[in-house]
Amino acid sequence: MTAALQPVLSHLAGRLDAAAILTGDAIDRRYLDDISGGVSSMPAAVLRPRSTAEVALVVAAFDAARLPLAVHGGRTGGSGGAVIQQGETVLSLERMTAVEPVDRLAGTVVAQAGAPLEALQAAARSAGLMLGVDIGSRGTATIGGAIATNAGGVRVLRYGMMRAQLLGLEAVLADGTVVSAMRGLAKDNSGYDWPQLLCGSEGTLAVVTRAKVRLHPDPPLKAAAFCALPSLDAAIALLARLRERLGPLLSAFEVMLAPLAADMAAALGLTTPVDAASPVCALVEIHGFSPDSDGATLSDALSEALDAGTATDIVMAQSTRELEGLWALRDGCSRFISQAGPAIGLDLSLPLAAMPGFLSEAAALVAAADPAGRPYIFGHLGDGNLHYIVLTSRPDAVSPVLHRLAARHGGSVSAEHGVGLLKKPYLPLVRSEAELALMRRLKTALDPHGTLNRGRIFDAPIRP
Amino acid sequence: MTAALQPVLSHLAGRLDAAAILTGDAIDRRYLDDISGGVSSMPAAVLRPRSTAEVALVVAAFDAARLPLAVHGGRTGGSGGAVIQQGETVLSLERMTAVEPVDRLAGTVVAQAGAPLEALQAAARSAGLMLGVDIGSRGTATIGGAIATNAGGVRVLRYGMMRAQLLGLEAVLADGTVVSAMRGLAKDNSGYDWPQLLCGSEGTLAVVTRAKVRLHPDPPLKAAAFCALPSLDAAIALLARLRERLGPLLSAFEVMLAPLAADMAAALGLTTPVDAASPVCALVEIHGFSPDSDGATLSDALSEALDAGTATDIVMAQSTRELEGLWALRDGCSRFISQAGPAIGLDLSLPLAAMPGFLSEAAALVAAADPAGRPYIFGHLGDGNLHYIVLTSRPDAVSPVLHRLAARHGGSVSAEHGVGLLKKPYLPLVRSEAELALMRRLKTALDPHGTLNRGRIFDAPIRP
């Protein structure tokens, strides 16, 4: 512990409960966990406030003492934002998990930042509504983290990202000021929408403490099909056609590119309803409100695709259980990869038109950088978002060339996982110096001493 | 013209074409027009650049000389943002109207800021797509203005506000820096989403010069009904039920509260398909993708409402022509009011649960403040957005009490029209001092000398 930290902790000890301040051996190893694989230092301390006022107290004290805080939600981020750098104290929102009763008429729910996404989903469900955002880590990821990183997931196509669900926000600025905009109106153009600036800023501008989130009507029909497609071009053509035919009914268009489905099915002992060795396996889902006919609209559109040759085989789920089975296949991708060996994972966004060209060039680059490298590709084709995984023992040779290639094809180096610490070197590939200067100006205006998540996304000057 | 302006204009005259700089008698009176009724001063000059580079040149020169610019799109804003204050020079985007060919696969279109919304709508239509935002002033309002003010309109319920359409942005900061984020990917979490900060900032943080906008599939079915409803409570119950039954199909739920429909119909010589004297007339519309059944889903839901007593009469449009007729009735509201006499117009957002209470208290307050005052109320009930108009010769007595009442009921003083100059006095009713301080900090960070739209939304300190 540094000499500067001791008086800050003493100051806080008189104001917080005993469980709010952890030091030394009391710090559980879980605070060092990070699913992105980044390696954390031991935190100088861990602070666990129970309320917005306590967060404000903590942040103000650290800011005044010029000591940096690493803000922790569920530590499920894919870009190492929660990795602890030398000298940082963890500010964890884990004790702020309250979820208020759903407001059915407004279609909203209010929760503290540390509430897991799953808790909001359950609250919504019990009111006959649904949360638009769903991600694999729903049981651990927090709503505050989802807002801070503008989380995406599997149904962005229909419901948008976390940004689109955000109706009200409360946050603590670096100087300890509490800002609150919790009216949560669907339409409100009264001044700058600062919650939208905070959304996706990865905890570098303020600490999210509470939010009001939009909920959606729960659709009476959820229908899905698993499709074997002859090529990525065919997948893109099918996506375009389904968008045209189904509009907002289309809730997911997920793909696995060969050899992923076959290797995954073999490794996990799963059976796919269509030939797993097909060039592309796609999971197509709709959320419908004319239940008697929307399913037919989907199967008509898919039959057309069979006739047109953009699909070679199609199996519609015949029950909720079968639909869940299709999603379990999709969820198997991450599970398979996490056990497949040392890997790098890129979270790329690409214009659909550029995707086929990107993929063939990428395959050549991987082969050149690491002849033993094995790419596995899956993701949210409906959003132009591919998770490009490479099993490789040479991450430093493979990762930069692929990120550069994505940028050259008009893509982004982070579609939904954010930049954190791990993607930081690649940010200048997709953001001009003018944009980076603008971001630094905003950071410096709101957090001049670099108290909050210092060094995440980019480096900014720090005022002493 | 001030002594400081002359050298700036001389500097620019050598770099811009002759039509780009207007002074003295060459300044058309149209630059003084403002539909909000605010009174403009004569501008010191009018500048009409043709490109982003020229905008940058102009802005940098004015910023260096510490001279203020009033940024003009189509001058259709409802809050006086385009009203010219003493000493301001107009920066008009009116010569930057290019619309690029639609990218059908990506579902996007790129346009310069001065392009009218209608031009983007036409481009979208010709590609079989649609723009999600539609407002009455579509022929004059510009895409740049719509982004700068986060425009709303009649289909927010389904497609969201302008913010939700914004995929890419190019803008000029106060110091003349051009920032550009035109990759326009559906998902991109690579650093701060500064375009979302600019959206709705009413030209106070930067000048929007170009944008990439999301387009939507054009629905094969557009169906609408005109409904007579017995009360506002019934309207809210019907809205809730239709949301549950129709989900994203519901594209509009517009209301006129008595006596508006009857007075408008009489004044404009229009016929309403249901009794215009009903307590509430509602226009309900869906955009459907299962054309054979979605219309039936709508009429089923409305029949249920008749049975339940939440509607007293319902007429479905039987053709496109009839549907357009229903919209013409809705559009008649603004036309009727603009000719009805001196009026104030509030653009309120309210929680649905608070709306009935607000309306009865508001009626009493209007009667007390101006016994001759006559309220006319219409708007986008689906978004909780009411345009509350009062024909009154005592605007200063009526307007503040209604804004205060809306704030007290958890509402906003600006749902979609922004704050500009006219709503500025009311902003502290709905924004805390901490929020206003945060907004000022952002303004000062990006525009320290107050060069861009000075004094709009709020006043900020100006660095000399």
Image: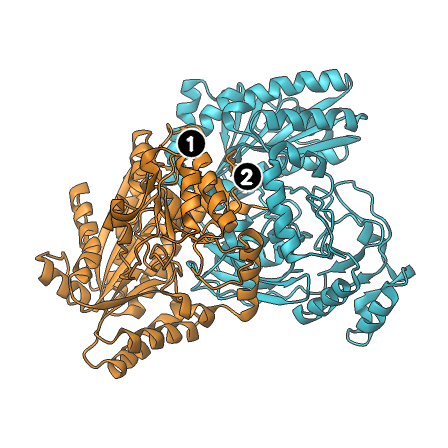
Chain colours: A cyan, B orange
User: Residue at point 73% right, 39% down?
Assistant: A422
> In x, y percent, where is residue B60?
50, 43
Give the CA distance from mark 1 to mark 2: 19 Å
Which class describes the residues within 10 Å of circle 1: few (<14), some (14-19), or many (20+)? many
User: Type of residue at label 2?
Assistant: Lys
Whether residue B35 is visible, yes or no, is yes
Q: Is residue B346 positioned above or below B98 on the image?
A: below
In the displayed image of the protein, which residue is found farthest to the bottom?
B368
Q: Is residue B212 positioned above or below B105 on the image?
A: below
Q: Which residue is mark 2?
A: B187
Give the left or right position of residue A293, taking residue A370 as reference. Answer: left
> In x, y percent, where is residue A268?
71, 32
> In x, y percent, where is residue B110?
41, 34
Secondary-structure class at tag 1: helix
In the displayed image of the protein, which residue is found farthest to the front?
B3
Q: Which mark is residue A451?
A: none
Give the chain letter at badge 1: A
Secondary-structure class at tag 2: loop
User: Type of residue at label 1?
Assistant: Leu
Quarter of the C terminus of chain B within the rendering = bottom right
Give the left or right position of residue A291, taking residue B278 as reference. Answer: right
Q: Which residue is mark 1?
A: A242
* Closest to the observer, B308 or B163: B163
> In x, y percent, where is residue A321?
56, 42
